[in-house]
Image: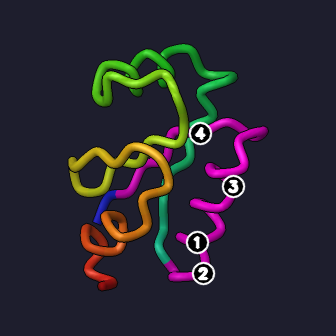
Amino acid sequence: MEVKVYSTPSCPYCNMLKSYLRSKGIKFVDYDVSRDERRAMEMVRISGQMGVPVTVINGKVVIGFNKPVIDKLLNLS
């Protein structure tokens, strides 16, 4: 399973999302789009959004901390 999180350090929903994933034992790669312009452009290209968090789970894009959708994609529901 591949999980990518596009976030910023100051975003409360990003921090809640990452804490949630850690609590479920889900490994993920975190991209800080406030410091990495290439990843920020990648996030906008795949999601059409400039806001964070954006999560990509096995190629499926989730915008925001949408726990029901995240749980479904992670087979947690």
Which residue is disc 1 drawn over?
A: 20
Q: CA distance from mark 3 to mark 1?
A: 8 Å
Amino acid type for the residue under numbered disc 1: Tyr
Quadrant of image for the N terminus: bottom left
Q: CA distance from mark 2 to mark 4?
A: 18 Å
Q: Are marks 2 and 1 in contact (CB under 8 Å)?
A: yes
Q: Secondary structure at mark 2?
A: helix
Q: Could you say where residue 16 lies in the image, as x and y percent from the top left?
A: 65, 61
Query: Where is 30 relative to 20, above or below?
Result: above
Q: Residue furthest left?
A: 59
Which residue is disc 2 drawn over?
A: 23
- Residue 43 sits in which quadrant? top left
Q: Crowding near pointer 4: few (<14 within 10 Å), some, many (20+)? A: many
* Label located before the other in sequence (1 or 4): 4
Q: Secondary structure at mark 3?
A: helix
Which residue is disc 4 drawn over?
A: 7
Q: CA distance from mark 2 to mark 3?
A: 12 Å
- Residue 48 sits in which quadrant? top left
Q: Are marks 4 and 3 in contact (CB under 8 Å)?
A: yes
* Label located before the other in sequence (2 or 4): 4
Q: Crowding near pointer 3: few (<14 within 10 Å), some, many (20+)? A: some
Amino acid type for the residue under numbered disc 4: Ser
Q: Crowding near pointer 2: few (<14 within 10 Å), some, many (20+)? A: few
* Label located before the other in sequence (4 or 3): 4
* Label located before the other in sequence (2 or 3): 3
